[in-house]
Amino acid sequence: MRGYDRRTFLAATGAAATALSGCTQLSGSRDAPGASDGDGTGNDAQTLDTLDVGGSPGEALPVVPENTVTLLDFFATYCAPCKPQMAELREVRSAFPDVHMLSITWERDAATVRSFWREYDGTWPVAMDPEVETGPTYDVQALPTMLVVDAGGTETWRHKGLAEAGTIEAELEAARQ
């Protein structure tokens, strides 16, 4: 009985720590069966369908358009740090309206994603990638993860977890140089 109680405690503690951090190992990560290593530079020919909600057009968009500084935000509606991240990203969107911003979720329920987008006032495109094609392409192994890609298609910054608007803005400015 004592071993069972300790195991239960350890399992609960681990689950709580994972839930509080919001960052989890993902099935689309490099270590998943069938996933590629990815070089972190992305694939500028890759497109995703965006949802028609908030500032999202509801049409296919390139993940990383050619000759364009890009901010990619990999998130999930159930991810605790992804919720306050939305306010930081709204600030970034206001400061950099010309930057290609795209939030990507691997969830399958469009209604849940639309509801999240409305609740947290998303003002930029949001795309669903339920087949997790972008995970291995960009070597995303935890949520939230943000990437800045310069106009030449090179990843210049990567961040896991909650990031402040000022930090993101500085990285976007550096990518413009």
Image: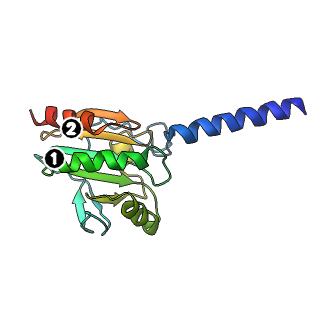
User: Mark 1 highlights which residue?
Assistant: 96
Question: Taking 77 as reference, is 88 left or right?
Answer: left
Give the class, few, some or many, for how many residues have Cα within 10 Å of label 2's Cα (few <14, many ≥20): some
Instruction: Give the quadrant of the N terminus.
Output: top right
Q: What is the secondary structure assignment of the residue under circle 2?
A: helix
The relative height of residue 117 versus residue 97 in the rendered view (above or below) is below
Q: Residue at x 50, y 41 (%)?
A: 22
Question: Taking 160 as reference, is 94 left or right?
Answer: left
Q: Residue at x 15, y 51 (%)?
A: 97
Q: Earlier in the sequence, mark 2 or mark 1?
A: 1
- Residue 48 in picture, x, y percent from top left: 29, 59
Furthest-right residue in this view: 1
Viewer-nearest residue: 43 or 55: 55
Three-letter code, disc 2: Glu
Three-letter code, disc 1: Phe
Q: What is the secondary structure assignment of the residue under circle 1?
A: loop
Q: Residue at x 88, y 30 (%)?
A: 2
Q: Residue at x 20, y 33 (%)?
A: 170
Viewer-nearest residue: 177 or 55: 55
User: Mark 2 highlights which residue?
Assistant: 169
Query: In which quadrant of the rendered view does residue 6 lie?
Result: top right
